[in-house]
Amino acid sequence: MERNLRRALGAFIALFCILAFYVGYISLRFGPKLASDPGNPRITLKERSVHRGDILARDGEVLATTSYEGSGPRRIYMGPLSLAHIIGYVHPSYGKSGIEREYNAVLISHETGYRGILDAGWASLSATPRGYDLVLTIDLKLQRSIEGLLRGMRGAIVVLRPDTGEVLAMASSPAFDPNSLDRDWDRLLRDPESPLLPRETQGLYTPGSAFKVILAAAALEAGVVSFRKVFRCPGYIEVGGKTVGCISAHGRLNFERAFAVSCNVTFIKVGQSVGPHGFYEMARRFGFNLDLPFDLPLKASSFPEEGRLGPHLLAQVSIGQGPILVTPLHMAMVAATVANRGAMMRPFIVSEVRGDDGIPIKRTRPQELARPITEATAEKLTTLMKDVVAYGTGYRARVGGLSVAGKTGTAENPHGQPHAWFIGFAPADHPKIAFSVVVENGGFGGTVAAPIAQKIILEAAKGWR
Amino acid sequence: MKEGTKLMFWAVIPVMLGMITVRLARGTTGADWEWAIGPVFALLFILAQIAVERERQADPLILPLACVISGIGLVEIYSINPGLAGRQLFWIFLGVAILVWGVVGTFDYLRLQNYGYVWAVLGVLLLVLTLLFGKEVGGARAWLAIGPLSFQPSEVAKVLLILFLAGYLKDGQEILGGAGRAFWGVSLPAMLYLGPLLLMWGVLLVLLILQRDLGQAFLFFGILLGMVFLVSGRTSYVLGGGLALIAAGLLTYNIFPHVRARVDVWLHPWQDPSGRGYQIVQALYAIASGGLFGTGAGFGYPELVPACETDFIFAAVFEEMGLFGALFVVGSYLLLVYRGFKIARDAPGDFGKLVAGGISILLGLQTFTIIGGVTKLLPLTGVTLPLMSYGGTSIITSFAGLALLVKISERERVFEWNAT
């Protein structure tokens, strides 16, 4: 019987090994996701038993904090209203949004159990534990100053640091007051201007001529065009039986000038030279049709598949019309890429997770996402974008004593006036900020968006002395 | 100091640490008497180990393993409900007392084999009584009440039937394992030998199924299969039994709606997370919240899982002690099963080998079944985790089984000693 006993034992060893591996597998593979699943009752229990961490601006000023006055803990928002979408809110009935939502687990997390006792001593067991604090990349002075720029309008502004990807300021208009959700919720939901919508990351717009930056990039990298190549613009062009107009009849002009004055005819011809494949490739390299990583949910921008780009559609996308959709953040990233010598940095808004005693638990390091264009191409694009502001459609973004680079956009759309766009960076030669401005149904990019950009640059420049 | 006693000192350390941590975590809501749980537990086991090892050459690992396993269970029960912890400590005390008395006393386990059919009759009787007069708890009529106390007769019946089987099968090695005209792998004499046994087993299974105690039915079947294998060495019996099990499973799935419900919840718990799937979903949340090292004893929320102190105690361990704690527990059980088989191997007679083997098989199978169910590896069955689950019957029968193991091992060593 000894042999049989041994075999039986072997069977049990095998069974228990299976059990051990299975247990390890489910714990490691599904554990983290399940633990932070909203259905886990522990999260709500933990939230109630933890002092939720604060959200701070770049300089340490408190933007969101928990107050214990009155009946139980309440979340108070002290930052400018333009940050409402980014920071979000925590509400017992309306749920969570923004950073409050995406970083919920971090804000209520702290060292627990054995390690907690060791770190904080026995006293920590009777006190209410405090969740981690978050430090954002937001420059409060800049944020406050851009707040009024979109007043009365629908749109968004995004300001990035091109060399790191940090979001210095971000605003969406109209906004709301997260402190008075109880009073305003129904009104906010029914408001046709969608004040709850974070347009910077969730708004999808046709880019219009601002998209010519990408076509120019494709053309320059393919060697299909040079600054001095001459084009002829009679004010219109026929493609596939349809006529596309230009702002005016530009006559004979070289590519450099065509970019600065945003000549549609030239760019339609350039689009034809680049071809659907080259164009699609460049759009893809700039992150179109991809889910780009960000601390908040970011809608993916879309560019049509190259198979769909027949002559008429190709002409449309060459001037940034047709089935192209972009988010304001993505366009800022496009400008930032040119500013950063062709390297697209991962955008982020949370720079640090801070523990109880102010000691950083985690710091975000800048990360390069992709290199859609070479440094040489970036340099050429910079020159072109400087021209736009120097003598082209973007002259109202001019700032005395500073070289500004940019591109206007006037995006036709079926809902009325065109969307006004302006994207760019400054100072052009050693960029400290890259930005995008979009005003829904605002009119001409050069008239409406460029002046806003000018004010942004003026404000940011105060910190550059 | 003997080896085992030294081990026992090591074994009580994690348990005491756990108790202290939970008491600290409870802070101001904890009562003063709770500080005593750990020390009393430790004292109990250390004294028991000394008693068992004093003059006997009994297996030194069984008690330390039982200490660690039941201790971790006690820590979790304490974290869930301190009142229950006090009662569980009492049951553990009784169980250990029975073990010590059984080992130290002059009781000769070999006498048990003479009562073969008594065990069988008792076992069947217990199950019949439960069927007729039992209380229904959680969909199964598994409890019998005597006055203010209630117990689970099927747990006792398992041990009784191991004793019966050991007595019946011990002489059957040639019949079952030997050469002979085989008929689909089963020889004629074997069929005659096994016939009455299978019949009786069928009766038992029907009784259990009628009581809706399918988990126990599975274990009974497993014990029979396992012990027949030990005696015969033929995998054909195991395979045949396995096929019968699958057939029975399919049959019950189609006939009984509650079986179908169990299987559906096992495969798709998230389809009804607040209804039928609530228990397993909460268990999975608990397991996930544990991470690698757990939340720390007393810092988790194990009480959110239904039946957390009984069938689902493992989920509590997983939440508060993490993957490492869970693997430690699985490893400890495996060690215990290994010790059981080792004792069986070294036992001097076939009766001893079969009893020890049967108990080891029961321990291993039951542990695997419930841990598998709690982690969604297997469908959920209403069986307890031996030595860990809260409950007088479960604890006492587990310790009774261990008592038999230690008793058998003691005989073995004495035998070796005499031989030199």
Image (tube, rainbow, N blue to C red):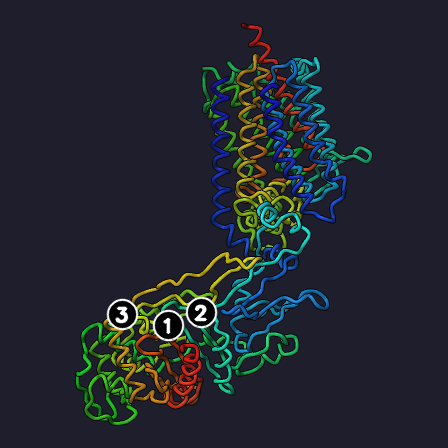
Dot 2: within a 10 Å radius of its alpha carbon, few (fewer than 14), some, or many (20 or more) residues?
some
Q: Residue at x 56, y 74 (%)?
A: A79
Q: Please report contact status of discs 2 and 3: CB closer than 8 Å, yes or no.
A: no
Dot 3: within a 10 Å radius of its alpha carbon, few (fewer than 14), some, or many (20 or more) residues?
many
Q: Please report contact status of discs 1 and 3: CB closer than 8 Å, yes or no.
A: no
Q: Residue at x 22, y 75 (%)?
A: A220
Residue B202's x, y, as percent? 61, 29
Query: Residue A333 bears which disc, if any?
Result: 1
Q: Look at label 2 and name its amino acid.
A: Leu
Query: Residue A373 bears which disc, if any?
Result: 3
Asked if A276 appears above or below A44 in the picture, the reply is below
Q: Look at label 1 and name its amino acid.
A: Met
Viewer-side residue, B15 vs A144: A144
In the rendered image, is residue B209 in sight?
no
Q: Look at label 3 and name its amino acid.
A: Ile
Labels 2 and 3 in the same subunit: yes
Read off the residue under disc 2. Answer: A298
